[in-house]
Image (cartoon, rainbow, N blue to C red):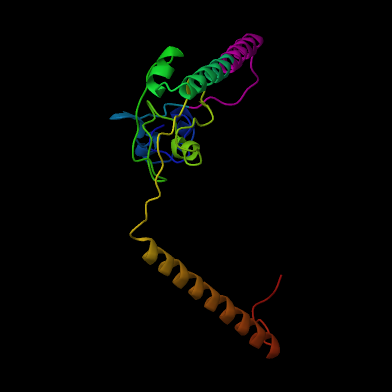
């Protein structure tokens, strides 16, 4: 899914549909899956939980084995490519040329990545900022492996940009904390006064 803080696949979201008396409840809200691409689903019915047949279980186990094997091969290939790229970078080669020599395709340059940056799910990993935020300029981040693709992130530069709204954000946080503390003190004082006055509750206790 694109533009989602949780990431994940669209199919997982479809299980959140809860049908009510409203006919519109059968339709899921549009899900952004790529740039200018949206998924809208309709619930036509539900199948009650049951035990799988042998054939179904066998097919599922086979598919899982193939997926696990493919994921392991993908990770190994990506790590091998990283090793080649690091050696090429150390020899003075550019990342683009090193990646090409390592057999990689789909090289993309992304700029102005911040903590609020929303990656394009079709061509970028969801945790792009987290993966690159602690990497020294000129270095390569840990391989980001997804179910059917892997990303090798090369950090060219990193800058610290001062947020013009930082001061007001801090003031708002301080004001909120002061108000919360005042309420806690008042609640504590009120509870103490009620206890000292031996106030009894008038409603019947169960």
Give the prevailing secondary structure in the magenta stretch.
helix
Residue 48, percent from left and from top: 57, 26
Q: Which of 3 and 162 is in front in this view?
A: 162
Q: Which residue lies furthest to the bottom in this view?
A: 197
How many marks the image carries: the answer is 0
Tell me, yes or no, whether the highlighted magenta stretch contains residue 61. yes
- Coordinates of residue 142 in the picture (x, y in percent): 54, 30
Instruction: Look at the picture and state if 137 lies above or below 171.
Output: above
Q: In which quarter of the image is residue 53?
A: top right
Q: Quadrant of the C terminus?
A: bottom right
Above or below — where is 172 with respect to 89?
Answer: below
Q: Which of 85 and 124 lies nearest the eye of the viewer?
A: 85
In the image: residue 65, left or right of residue 128: right
Q: Residue at x 35, y 38 (%)?
A: 24
12 relative to 5, above or below = above
Task: Tell me where residue 131 appears, x and y as whole percent.
Answer: 49, 36
Judge left or right: residue 161 versus residue 139: left
The image shows residue 123 at horizontal and vertical percentages of 38, 26
Q: From this viewpoint, which residue is outermost toward the front?
A: 91
Residue 26 in the magenta stretch? The answer is: no
Residue at the spot 58% in from the left edge and 76% down from the top edge = 184
User: 27 or 139: which is nearer to us?
Assistant: 139
**Residue at 45% over, 66% down:** 173
Q: Which of 105 and 15 is in front in this view?
A: 105
- What range of the chain is rendered magenta? 46-72
Q: Which residue is drawn at the image coordinates 49% and 38% (left, top)? A: 136
Which image quarter holds the N terminus? top left
Which quadrant of the structure image shows residue 94?
top left
| Left or right, 74 with reference to 202 | left
């Amino acid at each position: 899914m694109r533009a989602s803080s949780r990431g994940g696949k669209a199919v997982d979201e479809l299980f959140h549909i809860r049908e009510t008396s409203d006919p519109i409840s059968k339709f899921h809200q549009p899900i952004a899956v790529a740039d200018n691409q949206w998924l809208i689903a309709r619930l036509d019915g539900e199948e009650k939980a049951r035990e799988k047949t042998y054939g179904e279980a066998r097919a599922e186990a086979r598919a899982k084995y193939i997926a696990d094997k493919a994921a392991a091969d993908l990770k190994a290939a990506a790590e091998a490519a990283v090793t080649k790229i690091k050696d090429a970078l150390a020899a003075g080669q550019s990342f683009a040329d090193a990646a090409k020599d390592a057999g990689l395709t789909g090289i993309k340059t992304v700029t102005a990545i911040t903590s609020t940056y929303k990656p394009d799910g079709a061509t970028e990993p969801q945790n792009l900022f987290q993966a690159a935020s602690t990497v020294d300029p000129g270095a390569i981040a840990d391989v980001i492996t997804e179910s059917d693709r892997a990303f090798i992130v090369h950090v060219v530069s990193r800058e610290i940009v001062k947020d013009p709204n930082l001061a007001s954000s801090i003031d708002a946080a301080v004001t909120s904390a002061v108000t919360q503390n005042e309420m806690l003190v008042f609640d504590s004082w009120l509870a103490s006064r009620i206890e000292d006055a031996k106030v009894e509750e008038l409603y019947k206790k169960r």
